[in-house]
Image (tube, rainbow, N blue to C red):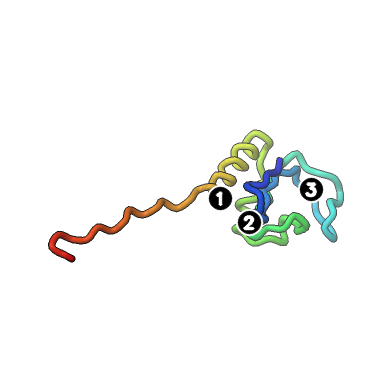
Amino acid sequence: MNTRVEPGQDWTVVLRRQATRIVAGQAEGGYTDAFEIICCDCGDRPDLDYAEVSPELQRIRGPYPIALGVTAYYQHLGQHHQRPAIPEPRRPAHGAG
């Protein structure tokens, strides 16, 4: 799974099968039964092995079994879609003027 949010935005989120290991940006040794989330907007890079990314990115990546991975993918994607609430306009206090 991968998705682009809106035209003109440059980040991508991908749910992919976890490679046994990545060497020089390529999967080596086959794949595991687990899936991982790669989020470029969070600073992750798909060419890095799990062990090469920060603990924070490892928590995002997973690994996940497929059903939990799909759920985690949509939850993570939703975090990027949340927009801050628009604050109410300030109203002048009574008597101000």
Q: Which mark is residue 41?
A: 2
At label 1, which amino acid type do we have? His
The residue depicted at 59 percent of the width and 45 percent of the height is 77
User: Answer yes or no: do the residues labelled 2 and 1 have beta carbons within 8 Å?
Assistant: yes
Residue positioned most to the top = 67
Which tag, 3 or 1, sits closer to the chain's start? Answer: 3
The residue depicted at 36 percent of the width and 54 percent of the height is 87
Q: CA distance from mark 2 to mark 3?
A: 21 Å
Residue 14 position within the rendered picture, expressed as x and y whole percent measured from the top left: 70, 46
Q: Front-most of 75 and 82?
A: 82
Which tag, 2 or 1, sits closer to the chain's start? Answer: 2
Q: Give the position of the N terminus as an image quadrant.
A: top right
At label 2, which amino acid type do we have? Asp
SS for dot 2: helix
Q: Front-most of 81 and 45?
A: 81
Q: CA distance from mark 3 to mark 1?
A: 26 Å
Relative to 92, residue 62 above or below: above
Residue positioned most to the front = 97
Q: Is residue 42 left or right of residue 21?
A: left
* Quarter location, residue 71: top right
Residue 20 position within the rendered picture, expressed as x and y whole percent measured from the top left: 80, 49
The residue depicted at 66 percent of the width and 54 percent of the height is 8
Q: Which residue is mark 3?
A: 19
Q: Which residue is mark 1?
A: 80
Between disc 2 and disc 3, the foreground one is: 2
Q: Is residue 79 left or right of residue 12?
A: left
